[in-house]
Image (spheres, helix red, strand yellow):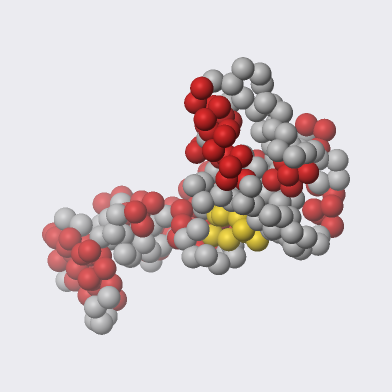
Amino acid sequence: MAALDVPKTVIKAIDRRRRAFFWTGEDVCHGSKCLVAWEDVCVSKDGGGLGIKDLEQQNRCLLMKFIDKLFSNDLAPWKNWILRDAASFDTPTNGSQSYLWKIISDERDTYRSITYVNVHNGASTSFWFDHWLPGGPLNITHAAFFSHTTRPNVSVQRVFQSRFDLCLRPRLTNSASVQLAALLSCLQDVVLTEEPDDRRLKLTGRHYTSKDAYTALDSSQDSTDLVGQRIWRTRVPNKVNFFCLVVFQGQIKYAVQSIR
């Protein structure tokens, strides 16, 4: 899962085995044996679920390590090969899409949405798409201005080397002109150095790990379930916690049957 984009059909087949083992201890089970929907089982415990890993999401988080290594300053032969003729981190070699480029293209936006960059030399930081200024990615915070650029994949380093030449289309709109003036004023405070850029997760402020990325992408974290928190933080046997959770899920009859 850390090297291959596992097909959804394979994940479904594995989940069928996991679901059957979880509820019955067998290889297969009927839907009537499942007391809680599998989607709810995969929700975190704080979110009111059972904390079982969502394999598709876990697969994505493991694959995003490729992107993190690509943007890092660590030396690796595969990075030299994949970037040999690439115009930028967003532009594949000669317009082709190798297997690694496909993984990078599929998950790059998600990776950027959960990370921010402490800019130093700006070489690996996208001027428009990375979160390197306090307000967020410029393609979002300065959308009107971004619509006029002809070089969306330019790096921060290139922009500073070209003295803020952003290759804009002529005749900026009023809103784009206002955003340009505000941006140029903000960029005056940025000073590049020789050190490599430092990229971290927004959730933790630490460097990328698939575990922290999984937590960051877990949508159930947005709405904390107080009942689930009370249940799993109680110092009683897990089977008692599980019984309570099933009761609160509305499956009281089946919970009683499972205890019997």
Looking at the rendered image, the quarter that the C terminus falls into is: bottom left
x and y, in percent, of residue 142 in the image = 53, 35
x and y, in percent, of residue 32 in the image = 26, 52
Residue 145, quarter of picture: top right
Q: Residue at x 16, y 55 (%)?
A: 250
x and y, in percent, of residue 90 in the image = 70, 40
Q: Residue at x 22, y 75 (%)?
A: 240
Looking at the rendered image, the quarter that the N terminus falls into is: bottom right
Residue in the foreground of this view, choosing between 130 and 37? 130
- On screen, residue 158 versus residue 131, left or right, reads right
Residue lying furthest top in this view? 171
Residue in the foreground of this view, choosing between 89 and 8? 89
User: Is residue 223 something that shows in the picture?
Assistant: yes
Residue 29, quarter of picture: bottom left
- On screen, residue 99 versus residue 256, left or right, reads right
Q: Residue at x 57, y 34 (%)?
A: 181
User: Is residue 73 something that shows in the picture?
Assistant: no
Q: Residue at x 25, y 82 (%)?
A: 235
- On screen, residue 259 versus residue 39, left or right, reads left
Residue in the foreground of this view, choosing between 139 and 77? 139
How many numbered discs? 0
x and y, in percent, of residue 135 in the image = 49, 47
